[in-house]
Image: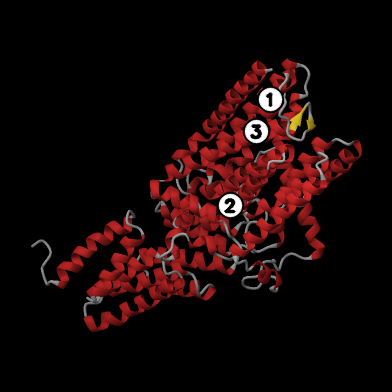
């Protein structure tokens, strides 16, 4: 018995290392990728919160993901603004998630059936490694994960999945061995998962269904669910949630959760299209797209019905294993399906499939392992792995930088204002201002465009005109930007820079001062909205330097260095502080 146990443990360790390595290598090319989309804003978010960079643990709003921001703050302390480090972290986290899928599959399956955590060791147990091994390899190379792994901001789904799987594994220990420490760990990891992303709340129903299917004592189930309920209450207290007020707000109004475009008559068609899309991408993960539209093809309605029809069939056939895993997929998708009726984000997205795919991959691995013909099993699985790996490798090319990502997205979603706007921004960053301007104007012509996006586009057009020294046109664009969204801090700061640039051509000091005061007024408005906005602080320093108010200039340059001591702006601020010091002493530079 001891030898069998040692053999089992040795094989488990070897296969675990293999899985980690496969997941790591398949996504290793991403470490050379750049920041894309909102990566920079997310990474610098802790820096924009004022004196306490960890106050995101007590934040409110619709997005409350303190562990995501904490992970970014840790990465920032090591890598600053070097994207390689952040991508490396994502790759390692995905490799850990793949390993946890292996362990989960290993502990809940036995002879193709759901099992209440086996701890016996016999010859059959060694054979039971195969379903879990196949499951985790499918998870490691599945192309639908490219968005979560290659996009630094997609880390939120990986973190949530890791902690949810750890919570579920802890619950398995508690369910079998009745160790209270297992339940405590379940609650801790559940809270960590919620701190990473709100879709972790689905664990409550997962544990309920698992407990009922495995014949777990009702008292144990009740204690488990009560404990999880306390965790949820703690989570919402810390979150200081404004979601209820958002839910009660009139659809389509500012700060409302519900979108005005969603009505009862079209809700079910949108819901079925989304469910059909998600299940189609799990099974056939091709033609992946960052901003897909909800499909309207009736075929997706049929696909959406299949999992629910299958659940009913499996229930009556008492196929508990398959029933549980399909339930896992549906339950973990539920929070993402709520996004369909909201106006807070993309209606559907491949990143939302990261957690549901864990259940799908465990099911797929189990089905593959049931192929009795070993040659057929090896050949078919090898084809899946090769095809999946190739598709993942090809999809990662789109994530190399902003230009490649948005070019791909515009080609696949030509009616997306967000795609055209970001493609235009990426082109401008590559100094292709003419083509970038065209893309921004195309974005403005799209039917579905928010006031916030209009403001962002007008701001970018204003920056383009400012660079070309078309100051009047730039002023018009900035005014339009702030008309669409008065709280656009970037537009306010850029508006200030515009007046600063305009002042440079004015020789008369008396005429120059009111122009710079306009600049200061706009930048201060931006800083009032976001006190940690480093660029605004730097720009204010420049303004006060221009009008020779050296003490104020010194104050803002020093605050830039204090908030971000290793940043590019800090290096510039240090040089400008020397100029300020010489100016205060009336010492000419170079003396």
Q: Which residue is mark 3?
A: 103
Question: Residue at 52% across / 68% down in the picture?
Answer: 455
For disc 1, the neighbor class at 10 Å (few under 14, some 14 to 19, many from 20) is: many
Q: Residues within 10 Å of mark 2 (few under 14, many from 20)?
A: many
Disc 2 target residue? 196
Q: In front here: 326 or 14?
A: 14
Residue 80 in percent (x, y) is at 38, 50
Q: Is residue 390 left or right of residue 460?
A: right
Residue at left offset 72%, top offset 66%: 261
At a point 70% along the width and 32% down the height, the residue shown is 107
In this rendering, the answer to whether 73 lies above or below 534 is above
Q: Position of residue 70 (x, y in %)?
A: 49, 53
Q: Can residue 295 be seen at all in this image of the molecule?
A: no
Mark 2 or 3, nearer chain start: 3
Label 3 residue SS: helix
Q: Is residue 56 visible?
A: yes
Mark linked to residue 354: none
Q: Which residue is mark 1?
A: 129
Quarter of the image where the N terminus is located: top right
Q: How is the image coloured?
A: secondary structure
Horizontal and vertical percent for residue 547? 24, 77
Residue drawn at the location 72% of the way across and 26% of the way down: 120
Residue 577 falls left or right of residue 419: left
């Amino acid at each position: 018995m001891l030898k069998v146990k040692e053999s089992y443990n040795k094989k488990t360790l070897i296969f675990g290392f293999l899985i980690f390595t496969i997941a790591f290598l398949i996504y290793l090319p991403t470490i050379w990728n750049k920041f894309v989309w909102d990566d920079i804003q997310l990474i610098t978010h802790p820096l924009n919160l004022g004196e306490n960079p960890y106050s995101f643990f007590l934040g409110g709003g619709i997005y409350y993901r303190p562990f995501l921001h904490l992970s970014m703050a840790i990465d920032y302390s090591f890598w600053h603004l070097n994207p390689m480090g952040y991508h490396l972290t994502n790759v390692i986290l995905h490799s850990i998630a793949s390993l946890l899928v292996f362990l989960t599959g290993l502990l809940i399956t036995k002879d193709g059936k759901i099992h209440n955590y086996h701890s016996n060791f016999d010859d059959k147990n060694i054979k039971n490694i195969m379903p879990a091994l196949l499951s985790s390899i499918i998870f490691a190379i599945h192309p639908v994960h490219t968005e979560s792994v290659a996009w630094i901001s997609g880390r939120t789904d990986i973190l949530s999945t890791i902690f949810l799987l750890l919570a579920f594994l802890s619950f398995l220990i508690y369910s079998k061995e009745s160790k209270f420490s297992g339940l405590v760990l379940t609650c801790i990891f559940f809270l960590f998962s919620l701190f990473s992303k709100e879709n972790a709340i689905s664990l409550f129903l997962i544990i309920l269904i698992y407990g009922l299917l495995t014949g777990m004592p009702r008292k144990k189930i009740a204690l488990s669910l009560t404990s999880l309920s306390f965790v949820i209450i703690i989570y919402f207290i810390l979150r200081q949630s404004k979601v209820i007020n958002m839910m009660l707000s009139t659809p389509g109004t500012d700060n409302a959760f519900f979108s005005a475009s969603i009505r009862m008559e079209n809700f079910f068609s949108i819901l079925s299209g989304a469910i059909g899309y998600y299940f189609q991408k799990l099974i056939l993960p091709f033609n992946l797209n960052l901003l897909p539209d909800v499909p309207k093809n009736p075929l997706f309605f049929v696909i959406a019905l299949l999992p629910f029809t299958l659940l009913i069939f499996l229930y009556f056939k008492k196929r508990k294993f398959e029933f549980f895993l399909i339930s896992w997929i549906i339950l973990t998708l539920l929070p993402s399906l709520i996004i369909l009726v909201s106006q807070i984000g993309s209606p559907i997205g491949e990143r939302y499939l990261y957690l549901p795919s864990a259940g799908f991959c465990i099911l797929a691995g189990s089905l593959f392992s049931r192929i009795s013909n070993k040659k057929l099993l090896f050949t078919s699985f090898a084809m899946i792995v090769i095809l999946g790996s190739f598709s993942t490798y090809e999809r990662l090319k789109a994530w190399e930088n902003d230009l490649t990502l948005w070019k791909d997205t515009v080609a696949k979603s030509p009616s997306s204002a967000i795609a055209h706007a970001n493609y235009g921004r990426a082109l401008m960053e590559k100094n292709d201002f003419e083509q970038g301007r065209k893309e921004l104007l195309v974005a403005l012509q799209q039917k579905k465009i928010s006031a916030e996006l209009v403001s962002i586009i007008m701001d970018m057009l204003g920056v383009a005109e400012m660079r070309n020294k078309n100051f009047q046109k730039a002023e018009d664009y900035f005014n339009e930007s702030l008309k669409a969204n008065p709280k656009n801090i970037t537009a306010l700061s850029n508006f200030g820079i515009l007046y600063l640039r305009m002042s440079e051509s004015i020789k008369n000091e008396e005429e120059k001062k009111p122009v710079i005061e306009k600049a200061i007024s706009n930048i201060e408005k931006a800083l009032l909205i976001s006190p940690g906005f480093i660029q605004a602080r730097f720009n204010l320093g420049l303004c006060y330097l221009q009008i020779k108010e050296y003490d104020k200039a010194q104050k803002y340059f020093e605050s830039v260095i204090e908030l971000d001591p290793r940043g590019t702006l800090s290096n510039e601020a240090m040089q400008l502080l020397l100029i300020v010091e010489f100016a205060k002493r009336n010492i000419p530079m170079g003396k």
